[in-house]
Image: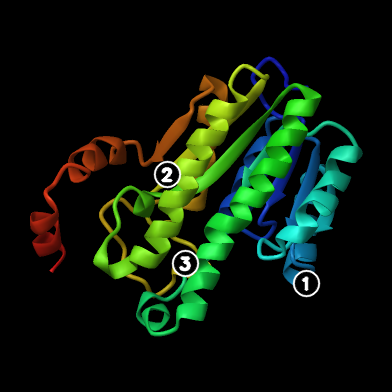
């Protein structure tokens, strides 16, 4: 169960090599999280991530997880919950895609959508149901400001995140009153390995800053968190910009 500061004692990270996921795990381990499951495709990187967290004193396990293999989600994630209660599940998987390439490659574009949205729908229902059965826990979903309004430069990725946002909000409503806390985290561009070489927007952030915001959101039992916080006000205006003007602003 959670301690008085709402620090989860057990954590499941879907996307076990994610820089944000690992930054969050490190921060929570420092706050008394003791058991961590890293879910991802078996790889040297996943094993190294697990080893790095063990040096911090956590009991770390790995489990095979592929967002695209939705048929396996119930069995593989179910094994984690069968080992004992999970206080927090962190959805930290996803792919940015390559907009220029994906526009001319529908299969690649569909893969972005299937990973970021369809995979999350499947895993979200599995984990949400398991948390409901145990009667407590938090499900934290890492999304992106790109889901707030589709832009010309990344509308394939952005549309997948928009779907993820809508699903997470609906799942939170479905689980309201069951003891399960659902929290959506919308961040600006995160400076990480996968974004090397990409232009940064004015609200760029870091994995550590996102991890800090996740912890604060857990303490406050927030339903939505913005990183950095100023994005909330900016996007409240951007959402209402007329489409014709928004198109010119992007040009």
Mark 1 or mark 3, which has the lower sequence index?
1
Residue at 41% from the left image edge and 50% from the top image edge: 162
Count of number-bearing discs? 3
Distance between mark 1 and mark 3 Cα atoms? 22 Å
Q: CA distance from mark 2 to mark 1?
A: 29 Å
**Mark found first going from the N terminus, 3 or 2:** 3
The C terminus: image quadrant = bottom left
Residue at figure coordinates x 38%, y 51% from the top left: 147
Question: On the rendered structure, is 88 left or right of 103?
Answer: right
Q: Nearer the viewer, mark 2 or mark 1?
A: 2
Q: Is residue 155 above or below residue 99?
A: above
**Secondary structure category for the residue under label 3:** loop
Q: Secondary structure at mark 1?
A: helix
- 157 w.r.t. 224: above or below: below
Q: Give the alpha-carbon distance from disc 3 to disc 2, as whole Å.
A: 15 Å
Q: Is residue 245 left or right of residue 130?
A: left
Q: Residue at x 88, y 34 (%)?
A: 84
Q: In this figure, which residue is indicated by the disc labeled 1?
A: 44
Is 17 displayed left or right of 233 in the figure? right
Q: Circles 3 and 2: CB distance less than 8 Å?
A: no
Callout 2 environment at 10 Å: few (<14), some (14 to 19), or many (20+)?
many
| Residue beneath disc 3 | 96
Residue at mark 2: 186
């Amino acid at each position: 169960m959670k301690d008085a500061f709402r620090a989860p004692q057990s954590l499941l990270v879907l996307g076990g090599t994610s820089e944000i996921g690992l930054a969050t795990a490190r921060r929570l381990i420092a706050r008394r999280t003791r058991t961590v499951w890293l879910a991802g495709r078996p790889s040297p990187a996943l094993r190294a991530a697990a080893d790095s967290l063990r040096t911090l004193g956590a009991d770390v396990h790995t489990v095979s997880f592929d967002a695209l293999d939705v048929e396996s989600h119930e069995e593989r994630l179910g094994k984690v919950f069968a080992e004992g209660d999970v206080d927090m599940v962190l959805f930290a998987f996803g792919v940015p895609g390559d907009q220029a390439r994906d526009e001319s490659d529908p299969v690649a574009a569909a893969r972005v959508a299937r990973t970021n949205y369809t995979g999350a729908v499947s895993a979200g229902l599995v984990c949400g149901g398991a948390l409901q059965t145990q009667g407590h826990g938090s499900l934290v979903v890492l999304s992106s400001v790109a889901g707030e309004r589709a832009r010309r430069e990344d509308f394939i990725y952005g549309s997948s995140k928009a779907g993820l946002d809508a699903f997470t909000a609906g799942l939170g409503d479905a689980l309201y009153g069951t003891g399960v806390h659902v929290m959506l985290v919308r961040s600006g561009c995160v400076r990480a390995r996968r974004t090397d070489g990409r232009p940064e927007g004015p609200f760029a952030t870091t994995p550590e800053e996102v991890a800090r915001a996740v912890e604060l959101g857990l303490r406050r039992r927030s339903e939505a968190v913005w990183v950095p916080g100023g994005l909330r006000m900016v996007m409240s205006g951007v959402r209402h910009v007329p489409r014709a003007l928004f198109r010119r602003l992007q040009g």
